[in-house]
Image (cartoon, helix red, strand yellow):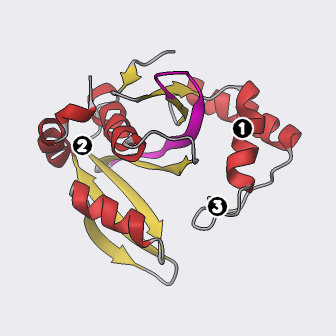
Amino acid sequence: MQFDLTAKTIYLRLLTEDDAEFVCQLRGDDKLNTFISKTDVDIEVQRQWIKNYKSREQNKKEYYFIICRVDDNRPVGTVRLYDFKEEPKSFCWGSWILNNNKTKYAAVESALLVYEMGFDKLGFDQSHFDVMKGNQSVHDFHLRMGAQQVSEDEQNIYYVFPKQRYEINKEKYAKFLN
């Protein structure tokens, strides 16, 4: 299964077992993992997790992408779509990490591609996700993009992002897409 998810400076490709070391590098970097759930950074454990994930991908229950630069195909991050719901028809996204080799607009572009995947390719009506408290730059980013805060608990703030806002953003941020 392949998806054409390409913006001006980055593209998304599906995760493979060969990406285990890269994922461990990202998730093991203390500057990058402050606001994500902790995982084992053993490459073989990660490779096994990817094998298990691939069956969820085959069953269309989850999609995990490597974010790559268009100019040299270098991987610069990860992002994942999961927790697909029917009522309302919604998807969650997370595991969003970008390293220092990212392009200037990789965050905007990867978010737009996540929404393209969820809304245009998979047919969802909204997205739901959470951001850890204290991760102010990510909170601000999602609010600028049009996410709506719906609740919070001790650790997280919860958001929804409607398809209608994505349609507005496709035009507003068109210069970031091809």
Residue that appears at 51% across and 49% down: 96
Circles 1 and 3: CB distance less than 8 Å? no
Report the residue that reaches farthest toward the bottom.
154
Task: Choose mark 2 or mark 1, whichever is in front.
Answer: 1
Q: Is residue 80 magenta?
A: yes
Q: Any mark on residue 22, and which?
A: 1
Residue that appears at 45% across and 81% down: 153
Kind of residue at disc 1: Phe
Q: Residues within 10 Å of mark 1 (few under 14, many from 20)?
A: some
Q: In what quadrant of the picture does the C terminus appear?
A: top left
Report the residue that reaches farthest toward the top.
1
Left or right, 122 with reference to 30: left
Label the magenta part by its dominant secondary structure: strand
Q: Is label 2 in a helix, a strand or a loop?
A: loop
Q: Is residue 137 magenta?
A: no
Circle 3 residue:
33
Kind of residue at disc 3: Asn
Q: Position of residue 44 (x, y in %)?
A: 87, 38
